Image: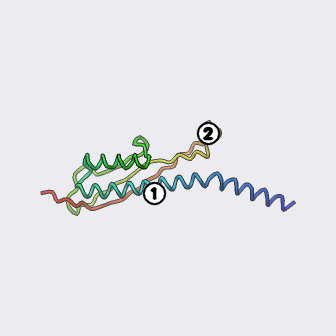
Amino acid sequence: MSEGVSVAIFVIFLWALAMFSPEFAAHATRAVQANELKEYAIQQTAKYGGYTSEVQAKIEKRMKEFNMSPTDWEVIHPANAVNMDQTFEIEVRGKYEYRVFNLLGTGVGHKDVPVKAVGSGLGQVLYR
């Protein structure tokens, strides 16, 4: 009898592992992509002296490469120009939708988890 119970527990554990592992891996991939986008945005903002239209175009291109929809992902950036050695902060916000909780496509158990990456940098352009 105890062998049957331990086999049942083991099967339940394997089922949970098989169901959640791909979701956890996909969530981790989105978090890594958000951090890469944040680092790229910091580098370009420092290089161009602020979040200009050129930087925005490059960020949007990088978002397309990562399959990050502009409606689901947001880049929060400094509004003004960034002077030499002035610190600025960039934040990338988005969400990951866990589909494993969506029972039979009914929307029951729909779970959105926020993905956030925050970083700061120093301006490299001197404005006079």
Q: Which residue is mark 1?
A: 32
For residue 108, the mark is: 2
Instruction: Tell me which amino acid carries mark 1.
Output: Val
Outermost residue to the top: 106
In the rendered image, residue 78, in percent from the top left (x then y), is placed at 28, 51
Quadrant (top left, top right, bottom left, bottom right) of the N terminus: bottom right
Residue at the spot 65% in from the left edge and 38% down from the top edge? 104
- Which amino acid lies under the numbered mark 2 shown in the image of this protein? Val
Q: Nearer the viewer, residue 104 or 109?
A: 104
Label 2, label 1: how many angstroms apart (C-alpha)?
28 Å
Residue 104 falls left or right of residue 79: right
Q: Give the x, y percent position of residue 40.
A: 34, 56
Which quarter of the picture shows residue 88? bottom left
Picture residue at 53% right of the left edge, 52% below the top: 26
Q: Residue at x 41, y 40 (%)?
A: 71
Return the x and y of residue 111 as percentages of the image width and height. Answer: 56, 45
User: The residue tagged with tag 1: helix, strand or loop?
Assistant: helix
* Image quarter of the C terminus: bottom left
The answer to which of marks 2 and 1 sits earlier in the sequence is 1
Q: Residue furthest right?
A: 1
> Within 10 Å of the Cα at label 2, are there few (<14), some (14-19), or many (20+) other Cα atoms?
few
Residue drawn at 44 percent across, 46 percent down: 67
| 66 sits to left or right of 112 | left
